[in-house]
Image (cartoon, helix red, strand yellow):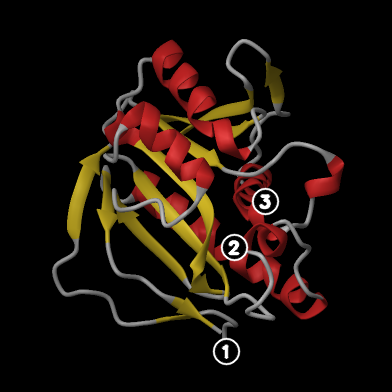
Amino acid sequence: MSLFQRLPQASNPKAFYTIGLNKTVLFIGLGNPGQEYIGTRHNIGFECIEAFAKKNDFPVWTNKKDLRCQLTQATIDGTRVLLIKPTTFMNLSGEAVLAVMQFYKIPASQVVVVHDELDINFGIIRTRIGGAAAGHNGIKSIMQHLGEDFGRVRIGIGPKIPDTIDSSDFVLAKFTSDEQKQLPPLTQEISAIISEYIFGDGQLLIESRNFII
């Protein structure tokens, strides 16, 4: 049995944007640059984007100082797929996202952000378009530059344990040893979601899809 179990989906999932041939789609993994942040809960967006790039044989990441990010790209099923990891630190992520969108002329409707979310328990992944930032400074920054009309893959990292710990300390802490063992199948599920967006008959779907331990 798979570690992550897909719950029943809504009967009428809503298509929220279309990716046709020769289009460009932008996936952003959120996190903080630097060795000290590797393996922290706040960097799960980086880790998932890196796993997708590796799985699909993307070229080596390139540091784009003018775009304030690390970037790699490839063409998949006729669609140019850009993956970025902002180098701005989390609170200024929107600056990198906007710079890339303007340079490559990508509309917000073809942007998907992969990020951690404290209000969702670990092992649960949800997709949506728009919505509140829920205290996530990276999402706040992106909303300030783009508005709300972009796709989101929200990866649960909660609940806080102990519940008295400061939220900023919790998200910047490393995953527990038990959680670390579960990260490979988690990143595989994220890669599957991204692939379904690209290959899904030219459409990205907004659905209530939970993956629970």
Label pair 3/2, CB-CB below 8 angstroms: no
- Position of the N terminus, as image quadrant, is bottom right
In this rendering, the answer to whether 135 lies above or below 145 is below
Q: How crowded is mark 2: few (under 14 residues within 10 Å), some or many (20 or more)?
A: some
Q: Which residue is drawn at 65% across and 54% down?
A: 42
Q: Name the residue type under label 3.
A: Asn
In this rendering, the answer to whether 132 lies above or below 90 is below
Q: In this view, does 128 lie to the left or right of 1?
A: left
Q: Name the residue type under label 2.
A: Gln
Question: Residue 26: x, y in percent?
Answer: 44, 32
Residue for badge 3? 43
Specify which label sits upstream in the sequence, 3 or 1. Answer: 1
Q: Residue furthest right?
A: 35
Between 26 and 30, the residue placed more toward the observer is: 30
Question: Residue 47: x, y in percent?
Answer: 67, 51
Q: Give the image quarter of residue 41.
A: bottom right
Specify which label sits upstream in the sequence, 3 or 2. Answer: 3
Q: Name the residue type under label 1.
A: Met
In this rendering, the answer to whether 74 lies above or below 190 is above
Give the alpha-carbon distance from disc 1 to disc 2, as whole Å.
15 Å
Q: Residue at x 56, y 84 (%)?
A: 213
**Secondary element at image label 1:** loop
Q: Which numbered circle lies on residue 188?
A: 2
Q: In this view, does 47 lie to the left or right of 204?
A: right
Residue for badge 1? 1
Q: Residues within 10 Å of mark 3 (few under 14, many from 20)?
A: many
Question: Residue 79: x, y in percent?
Answer: 39, 31
